C-alpha cells in the first residue's frame, strides 16, 4: 500500500481545513518595504530586520499591542533607527506584496468541493482589515481566529482550543496548515492532522493524499 493510499484510508473522514495566512496564502515580508531604505547595504538591512524590528516585536502587535505603543517602545530602545521604525504603519501595505497564487488555487478547489474552511492567523487588528480589503479570498473562510482580536497568539495552545470551540472543529477530522514548525507542532499536540507548508505543490500533493483534492 502506498503512502498516498494509507493517507486516504486514515484520513477519509477529514471535513475541515484550517489555514495560516501569512507566508501560506499571503506573500508578506518587512524586507519588501524596508529594503528600499538600505540601498546597496544588505548587511544593514539584515541587521535592521533581525535586531530592530524583530519577529518578537512584530508578535507584540499581533498579540494586541497598538502599533503606536510598540513603535514608541522600540524607538526608545533604538533611537538611531527611530525615523525608520516610525514608518511601520505607512509601510505595512507595501510589505504585503500579494497572494501566493498556488495556495489560493488550492483554497479555491477546496471551497468548490464544499470543504469547511477556517483560518487561525497571527495578525494585528490594525492591519488585518487592510488585507481583507485587498483579497476577496479571505472572505471564503467560515471563521477566522485573529490573534490580535482574541489576545492569544500561535503557538499558544489556547488559540487552537479557542478555534476548536468557535469553529466547531473535531481536530481528528481537521487539517491545520502553517509555515512555522512551532505552530504545526502545537496544532499536532491538540490532535490536528498537520501540514508544514513550504510551497503550494507539496501542499497540493499532501491534501490529495488526504483525499481532499
Image (cartoon, rainbow, N blue to C red):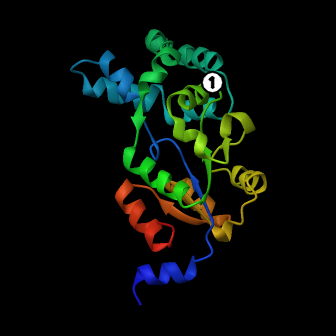
Pointer 1 residue: 126
Q: Is disc 1 placed on a helix, strand or loop?
A: loop
Q: Residue at x 72, y 66 (%)?
A: 170
Q: Is residue 96 left or right of residue 72?
A: left
Say if 180 sits above or below 133 in the image: below
Say if 73 sits above or below 192 in the image: above
Residue 119: x and y, percent?
A: 61, 48
- Which quarter of the figure has residue 10? bottom right
Q: Quadrant of the N terminus?
A: bottom left
Residue 82: x and y, percent?
A: 48, 11
Q: Residue furthest bottom?
A: 1
Q: Residue furthest right?
A: 165
Task: Identify which residue, 189 or 4, lies in the foreground.
Answer: 4
Residue 199: x and y, percent?
A: 37, 54
Q: Residue at x 42, y 81 (%)?
A: 3
- Which quarter of the figure has residue 152? top right
Check disc 1: other Cα within 10 Å, few if <14, some if 14-19, many if 20+.
some
- Which quarter of the figure has residue 113? bottom right
Q: Is residue 178 left or right of residue 60?
A: left
Q: Residue furthest top?
A: 83
Say if 123 sits above or below 44 in the image: below
Task: Identify which residue, 129 or 113, lies in the foreground.
Answer: 113
Say if 194 sits above or below 180 in the image: below
Residue 84: x and y, percent?
A: 44, 13
Count of marks placed on residues? 1
Q: Residue at x 53, y 36 (%)?
A: 136
Q: Residue at x 48, y 83 (%)?
A: 6
Amino acid at each position: 500500500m502506498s503512502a498516498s493510499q494509507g493517507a486516504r484510508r486514515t484520513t477519509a473522514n477529514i471535513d475541515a481545513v484550517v489555514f495560516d495566512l501569512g507566508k501560506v496564502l499571503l506573500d508578506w515580508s518587512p524586507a519588501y518595504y524596508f529594503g528600499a531604505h538600505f540601498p546597496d547595504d544588505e548587511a544593514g538591512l539584515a541587521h535592521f530586520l533581525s535586531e530592530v524590528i524583530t519577529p518578537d516585536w512584530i508578535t507584540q502587535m499581533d498579540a494586541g499591542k497598538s502599533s503606536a505603543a510598540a513603535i514608541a517602545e522600540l524607538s526608545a530602545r533604538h533611537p538611531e533607527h527611530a525615523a525608520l521604525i516610525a514608518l511601520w504603519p505607512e509601510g505595512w501595505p507595501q510589505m504585503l506584496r500579494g497572494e501566493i497564487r498556488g495556495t489560493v488555487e488550492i483554497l479555491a478547489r477546496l471551497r468548490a468541493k464544499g470543504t469547511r474552511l477556517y483560518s487561525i492567523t497571527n495578525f494585528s487588528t490594525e492591519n488585518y482589515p487592510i488585507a481583507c480589503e485587498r483579497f476577496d479570498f479571505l472572505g471564503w473562510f467560515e471563521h477566522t481566529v485573529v490573534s490580535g482580536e482574541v489576545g492569544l497568539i500561535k503557538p499558544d495552545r489556547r488559540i487552537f482550543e479557542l478555534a476548536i470551540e468557535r469553529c466547531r472543529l473535531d481536530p481528528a477530522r481537521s487539517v491545520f496548515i502553517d509555515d512555522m514548525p512551532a505552530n504545526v507542532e502545537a496544532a499536532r499536540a491538540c490532535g490536528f492532522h498537520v501540514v508544514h507548508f513550504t510551497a503550494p505543490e507539496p501542499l497540493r500533493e499532501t491534501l490529495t493524499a488526504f483525499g481532499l483534492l
